[in-house]
């Protein structure tokens, strides 16, 4: 999406400490602070997670760890017999721009499927059904997912900001 908007970017592979906290915004703010001065120029970073209503927002900021520990199967097992399957994917982009940090959140509401479906995407995509749809993220095209996804919505806000600069 950045390239389509005429914005050049380069992936920088740099490990940084990820704090344990309650919100994606806190994680991103800490990352921006830590990376400032270690990355030359302006930079963009993001964090995202799956927040399931009936589980009090779990796995939330721990989504990556939970996925690598129990996967989609584990989440489905936890949700066995649970009627409230409302969930949302959330993303927060942090932009370090001209020595200022800005946050751009994005949300994709939906529900948790009862079984894994689809071959596309990654992570929890086979068990997340975006609102207004019957298919999981793993069953739809990349283009359609980008229009619906939390990351796509957050990145649109970043692009809108950058176009105004």
Image (cartoon, rainbow, N blue to C red):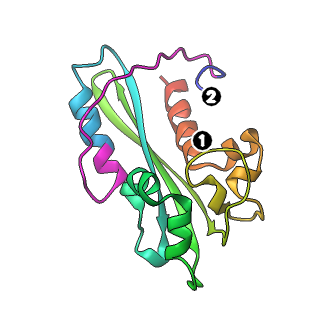
Q: Please state which of residues 113 and 151 is positioned toward the viewer in this rendering.
A: 113
- The quadrant holding residue 84 is bottom right
Q: Main secondary structure of the magenta part?
A: loop
Q: Residues within 10 Å of mark 1 (few under 14, many from 20)?
A: some
Q: Are marks 2 and 1 in contact (CB under 8 Å)?
A: yes
Residue 150, given in percent of the width and then of the height, sits at 56, 49
Residue 100, given in percent of the width and then of the height, sits at 29, 29
53 relative to 9, above or below: below
Disc 2 or 1, which lies upstream in sequence? Answer: 2
The residue at the point 62 percent across, 28 percent down is: 1
Q: Please state which of residues 118 and 11 is positioned toward the viewer in this rendering.
A: 118
Query: For the magenta stretch, what is the residue range?
Result: 5-27
Q: What numbered label is drawn on residue 1? A: 2
34 relative to 70, above or below: above
The residue at the point 24 percent across, 40 percent down is: 30
Which residue corresponds to mark 1? 152
The residue at the point 46 percent across, 60 percent down is: 70
Residue 147, given in percent of the width and then of the height, sits at 69, 45
Q: Residues within 10 Å of mark 2 (few under 14, many from 20)?
A: few
Is 159 a magenta residue? Answer: no
Q: CA distance from mark 2 to mark 1?
A: 8 Å
- The quadrant holding residue 93 is top left
- The quadrant holding residue 116 is bottom right
130 relative to 17, above or below: below
């Amino acid at each position: 999406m950045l390239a389509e908007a005429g914005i050049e970017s380069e992936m920088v592979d740099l490990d940084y400490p990820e704090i344990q906290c309650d919100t994606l915004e806190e994680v991103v703010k800490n990352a921006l602070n830590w990376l400032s001065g270690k990355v030359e120029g302006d930079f963009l970073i993001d964090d995202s997670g799956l927040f399931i209503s009936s589980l009090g927002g779990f796995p939330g900021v721990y989504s990556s760890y939970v996925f690598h520990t129990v996967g989609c199967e584990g989440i489905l097992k936890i949700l066995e017999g649970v009627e409230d399957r409302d969930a949302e994917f959330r993303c927060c982009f942090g932009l370090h721009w001209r020595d200022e940090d800005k946050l751009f959140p994005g949300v994709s509401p939906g529900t948790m499927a009862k079984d894994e479906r689809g071959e596309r995407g990654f992570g929890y995509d086979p068990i997340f059904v975006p609102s207004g749809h019957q298919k999981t993220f793993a069953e739809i095209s990349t283009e359609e997912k980008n229009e619906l996804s939390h990351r796509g919505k957050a990145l649109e806000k970043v692009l809108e900001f950058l176009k105004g600069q």
